[in-house]
Amino acid sequence: MTDTVVTVQNPEVPRSGKPGAENANIHNMFTWVEINYNYFKTVPGLLKLAQLILGIICLALASPARLPGTNWFLFVVIISFIATAIWSFVYLLSIREAINFPINWILTEFFNTLLLAVLYMVAFIVQLSAWSTHNRPYNSYNSYYKNLNISAGIFGMINTAVYATGVFLIFSGWKKSRTAVQQ
């Protein structure tokens, strides 16, 4: 009869004096996270930063909502801001590379950005039409909010163009990747 000997070694955890050093598995929990600052030096990364900044400007100029059209405008701005922030974190933390889900990331981002561009276009049209045709007696109070909200609509128009540029760049990248796969 043969005997099998199994030797188990207990690795020693370095004692650095830091809290949590006893449990080295906590460190291994986030090893998949890789910070990618270089994405924001590319044109799509700069566009995402511009979308976020313009969204903040739109929020600041149109808040609080004084007309029903502004409610829709602010809803679209907030939804777009949240979606763009999520995509920014996806690229910043390299989540696309870390997660092995069967997701076509480029097409998902394309349809998301396309939807946001269309919603932004409708929202800035509603915002500008609500405030340009609003007939209240003229006084400085109404003029002040009217100017701010028309400015918000104009910044919304600019952000629509930025989102449309993002749609074009994502579509071009997707088309190039499809051509490269087929060759």
Image (spheres, helix red, strand yellow):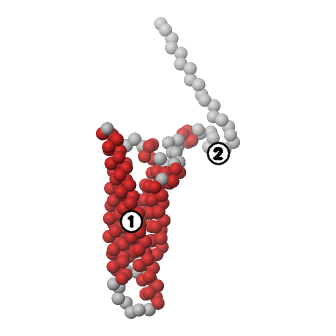
Q: Residue furthest right?
A: 17
- Which of 8 and 27 lies nearest the eye of the viewer? 27
Element assignment for label 2: loop
Q: Quadrant of the C terminus?
A: top left
Where residue 13 sits in the image (x, y, percent)? Answer: 63, 34
Between label 2 and label 1, give the one nearer the viewer. 1
Badge number at residue 65: none
- In front of the other: 55 or 6: 55
Q: 112 or 14, which is in the foreground? A: 112
Residue at (36, 72) in percent of width and height: 124
Mark carried by residue 161: 1
Indicate the amino acid at tag 1: Ala
Q: Position of residue 154 (x, y in %)?
A: 41, 74
Name which residue lies at 33% across and 75% down. 126
Disc with the residue nearer the chain's start (2 vs 1): 2
Q: Which mark is residue 19?
A: 2
* Residue 63 lies in quadrant: bottom left
3 in relation to 28, above or below: above
Residue 147 spot, x, y in % from top left: 44, 82
Residue 4, x across and y down, in percent: 51, 14
Can the viewer see residue 106 in this picture?
Answer: no
As measured in the structure, the alpha-carbon distance from the residue carrying label 2 to the one carrying label 1 is 49 Å
Q: Amino acid at mark 2?
A: Pro
